[in-house]
């Protein structure tokens, strides 16, 4: 299985409900979620919109080379165990066809090495 690294830093942000429309900006990569408790945006750090109430920088992203079949079992678990084994914080997110992992920047290279050692092919995919 091939893992692609996305070579831009990402930020995890909290938005007030009335600013959620700011997420309609044309992002190439962004993840938006809104529940009854909060609205969140994950996007490249250089594209964070104005109006966020909290911002956590220092994340790097990688993805399982798309498309990911919905019947694939255990990919999220296997990779999460690898990241936990090298003590790297992870935030998984996804789209219909793709699984993404956001990793804390301070453990990013260690996580990539662990993936390689566990049989994953890692390649760079530029944004």
Image (cartoon, rainbow, N blue to C red):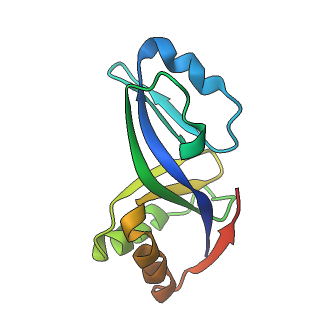
Q: Position of residue 30 (x, y in %)?
A: 59, 40
Q: Position of residue 2 (x, y in %)?
A: 63, 74
Q: Position of residue 62 (x, y in %)?
A: 55, 62
Q: Position of residue 50 (x, y in %)?
A: 52, 24
Q: Please state if 19 lies on the left or on the right of 1 as rendered.
A: left
Q: Quadrant of residue 48?
A: top right
The total number of labels drawn is 0
| Residue drawn at 58 percent across, 17 percent down | 21
> Residue 71, relative to residue 15: is it above or below?
below
Front residue of 94 and 60: 60
| Residue drawn at 48 percent across, 31 percent down | 33
Q: Please state if 19 lies on the left or on the right of 67 as rendered.
A: left
Figure quadrant of the N terminus? bottom right
> Residue 78, relative to residue 25: is it above or below?
below
Figure quadrant of the C terminus? bottom right
Q: Quadrant of residue 77?
A: bottom left
Front residue of 117 and 107: 107
> Residue 95, relative to residue 70: is it above or below?
above
Q: Please state if 106 lies on the left or on the right of 18 as rendered.
A: left
| Residue drawn at 40 percent across, 23 percent down | 35
| Residue drawn at 29 percent across, 76 percent down | 85
> Residue 20, relative to residue 62: is it above or below?
above
Q: Residue furthest top?
A: 18
């Amino acid at each position: 299985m091939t893992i692609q690294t996305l070579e831009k830093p990402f930020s995890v942000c909290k938005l007030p409900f009335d600013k959620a429309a700011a997420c309609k900006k044309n992002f190439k990569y962004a993840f938006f979620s809104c529940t009854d408790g909060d609205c969140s945006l994950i996007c490249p750090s250089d594209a964070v919109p104005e109006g966020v109430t909290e911002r956590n920088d220092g994340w790097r992203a990688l993805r399982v080379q798309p498309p990911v079949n919905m019947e694939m079992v255990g990919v999220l678990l296997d990779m999460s165990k690898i990241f936990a084994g090298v003590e790297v914080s992870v935030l998984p997110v996804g789209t219909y066809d793709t699984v993404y992992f956001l990793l804390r920047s301070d453990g990013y290279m260690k996580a990539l090495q662990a993936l390689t050692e566990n049989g994953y092919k890692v390649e760079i995919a530029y944004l």
